[in-house]
Image (cartoon, rainbow, N blue to C red):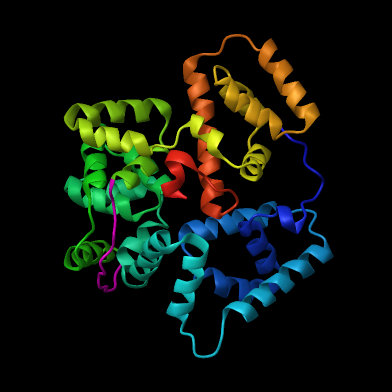
């Protein structure tokens, strides 16, 4: 692992960390107002970043505030509506296709209060709420939620239900407004209030693969075997979209360095046992010389490791990579790039 300096400069801060610095400068009342307009996952990420911030210099705070002010002045103008501003910002940041998907989800969040409430609930509670529903309903709910949350919920469902639900997620090709509205109403009645639905592009093989990326190796293997046994072409499509440890070879150097900063050295050591030499060399190249030499020595000295341990460590590192990608700190490539 590369060595960290005592503090991090703004250039090395992720977008989430810069947002945390900004919120801490606003004061309790103003920060609370901002957080009210953020989704569950965003609040959790920013909240965790706020709790972990340390050694933030006055110059860095000033720099964050200056950049924020400059960004507002350069990207907003009189006469441009909020929706149009949001569309332009997201298109510039993500491209047309990904921006369209994100905008769609934002619009759903405005009207789908029942479904949106599930994002704030514990996975076990959500599973209990939907476990007796038809698998198609469960699939729509999981496709609507963030992939890591959906994966946790899937693990709480009966084992015999999981392959069917995941196949339905993969087979989803959009949801009609009336169907989404009815589902939203059913869920919201449990929390009180009313809502209306809005169409959304949910599901698909990419969504199923995204959920699988957050499952453990044994669960992933079992599910893929069951899905492939029922529908071989669908299983192949999902498998092609699953981001694997070998795909880390496609990370650019900056992204690899950021990932290595976030990965515990003991997990990296186990994950690299049996890894292709090209990937090992890429990782060594993105570490300090001393850290790379220590890792090489540790790999040579390390005895045999069970395959299950290696796969588990690799999965943990991939989970870190996906979370960094979702926060904008790194850019995934290869098979997983559709999920960035």
Coordinates of residue 146 in the picture (x, y in percent): 40, 52
The answer to whether any part of residue 133 appears in the image is: no
**From what the image shows, is residue 47 above or below residue 243?**
below
Residue 315 shows in this picture: yes
- Our reading of the magenta stretch's main secondary structure is loop
- Judge by depth and name the residue closer to the eye, 292 or 169: 292
**Does the stretch in magenta take in 295?**
no
Q: Is residue 30 above or below residue 80?
A: above
Which region of the structure is painted magenta? 191-204
Residue 208 image offset from top left, x and y in percent = 32, 43
At a point 52% along the width and 33% down the height, the residue shown is: 316
Q: How many discs mark residues in the rendered view?
A: 0
Q: Quadrant of residue 273?
A: top right
Work out whether residue 48 or residue 80 is closer to the camera in this orientation and state it.
Answer: 80
At 58% from the left and 48% from the top, the residue drawn is 330
Let me know if residue 195 is in the magenta part. yes
Q: Which quadrant would the N terminus be assigned to in this image?
A: top right
Residue located at (52% from left, 45% from top): 332
Q: Considering depth in this image, is 306 or 189 the residue closer to the camera?
A: 306
In the rendered image, which quarter is residue 153 located in? top left
Q: On the rendered structure, is 308 left or right of 197?
A: right
């Amino acid at each position: 692992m590369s060595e960290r300096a005592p503090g991090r400069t703004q250039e090395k801060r992720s977008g989430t960390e810069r947002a945390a610095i900004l919120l801490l400068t606003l004061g309790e009342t103003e920060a609370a107002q901002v957080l009210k307009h953020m989704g569950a996952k965003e609040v959790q990420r920013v909240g965790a970043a706020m709790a972990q911030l340390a050694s933030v210099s006055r110059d860095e705070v000033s720099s964050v505030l200056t950049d924020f002010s400059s960004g507002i002045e350069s990207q907003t103008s009189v006469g441009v509506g909020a929706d149009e501003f949001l569309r332009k910002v997201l298109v510039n940041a993500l491209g047309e296709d990904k921006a369209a998907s994100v905008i769609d989800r934002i619009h759903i969040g405005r009207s789908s209060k029942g479904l949106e409430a599930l994002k704030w609930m514990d996975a076990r509670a959500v599973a209990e709420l939907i476990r007796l529903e038809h698998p198609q309903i469960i699939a729509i709910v999981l496709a609507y939620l963030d992939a890591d949350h959906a994966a946790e919920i899937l693990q709480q469902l009966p084992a015999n239900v999981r392959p069917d639900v995941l196949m339905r997620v993969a087979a989803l090709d959009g949801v009609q407004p009336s169907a989404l509205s009815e589902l939203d109403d059913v869920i919201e009645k449990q929390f009180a209030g009313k809502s209306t639905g809005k169409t959304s592009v949910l599901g698909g093989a990419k969504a199923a693969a995204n959920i699988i990326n957050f499952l453990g190796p044994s669960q992933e293997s079992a599910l893929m075997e069951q899905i492939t046994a029922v529908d071989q072409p669908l299983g192949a499509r999902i498998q092609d979209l699953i981001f694997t440890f070998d795909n880390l070879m496609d990370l650019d150097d900056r992204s690899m360095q950021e990932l290595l900063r976030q990965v515990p050295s003991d997990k990296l050591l186990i994950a690299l046992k049996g890894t292709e030499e090209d990937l090992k060399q890429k990782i060594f190249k993105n570490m300090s010389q001393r850290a790379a030499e220590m890792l090489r020595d540790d790999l040579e000295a390390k005895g045999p490791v069970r395959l299950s341990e290696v796969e588990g460590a690799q999965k943990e590192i991939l989970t870190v990579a996906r979370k960094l990608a979702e926060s904008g700190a790194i850019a995934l490539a290869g098979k997983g790039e559709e999920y960035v």
